[in-house]
Image: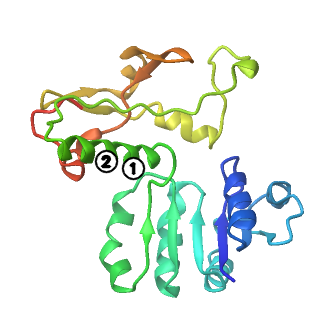
Amino acid sequence: MKKVLILGAGHVTKPIVEYLTEKCGYNVTMGARTISKAEKIIAGRALASAVSWASHEEDKLDKLIAEHDLVINMIPKAHHVMVAKLCLKHRKSMVSTSYEIPPIKELDAEAKERGILILNELGEDPGMDHFATQMLLDDIKTDGGKVIDLHSYGSGLPSFKFNNNPMGYKFSWEPKGVFLAAQVPAKWLDKGKPVQIDGDKLFENFTMVDIEGLGTFEAYANKDVTRYVKPYGLPEDVTF
């Protein structure tokens, strides 16, 4: 039976535990600094267990990774390189929902050589948006079309019933990460020409987007999209 190690016990890990234990029948171990959070997510599932682990306990993590088949890394990206290198050591694949950072990308060749996956950007955004966008682009090209303008929107919408704060926002991931991301400069393309938005001006530059059945929402540019032009196979003069 497959054994999966999940690092972190944030809100987004609950559906992972449910899916892996109930749908796949895998054994799941949750490693978390606050073990009570992990135990709450596990909720007595026979195939799941929790262990106390903090990011500075590298020796303990080394043993945990050696005992499992797959690592799902849901801790802050500051610790991802350490986890990835231990996965390389033990030839265990690692996946995460975080953006791929340069030090992780540098491990790609070694990961392939050792026959494992180190795969990032597997969440909703980034993640499912990549899959949906690529499928759309493939269909357009198959039909002989050309992409001249591409806008991709991603969001987790809180229930309107519980939308009870001035921001209209609910935390589903690390609160600190939300505010740090809100200060990251954005870069997009207007007919192939780069447009830069400073981090402190991010929320001053927004557009209104109508979503059928839900209403009108504010949309803002998210980080640097120019790095996806080549992987998506987009033309140089695209608006993206």
Place of residue 28 in the rendered image (x, y in percent of width and height, measured from the top left): 72, 71
In the rendered image, the vertical position of residue 180 relative to residue 36, given as above or below = above
Q: Residue at x 31, y 69 (%)?
A: 106
Residue ID for mark 1 = 131
Residue ID for mark 2 = 134
Q: Is residue 62 left or right of residue 47?
A: left
* Residue 53 in view (yes/no): no
In the rendered image, the vertical position of residue 140 relative to residue 170, given as above or below = below
In the rendered image, the vertical position of residue 158 relative to residue 218, given as above or below = below
Coloring basis for residues: rainbow
Q: Residue at x 47, y 31 (%)?
A: 182
Amino acid on which disc 1 is placed? Phe
Residues marked 1 and 2 touching at CB (< 8 Å): yes
Place of residue 191 in the rendered image (x, y in percent of width and height, measured from the top left): 13, 27
In terms of depth relative to the viewer, which is nearer, 231 or 91? 231
Quarter the C terminus occupies: top left
Amino acid on which disc 2 is placed? Gln
Q: Quadrant of residue 31?
A: bottom right
Q: Residue at x 22, y 40 (%)?
A: 140
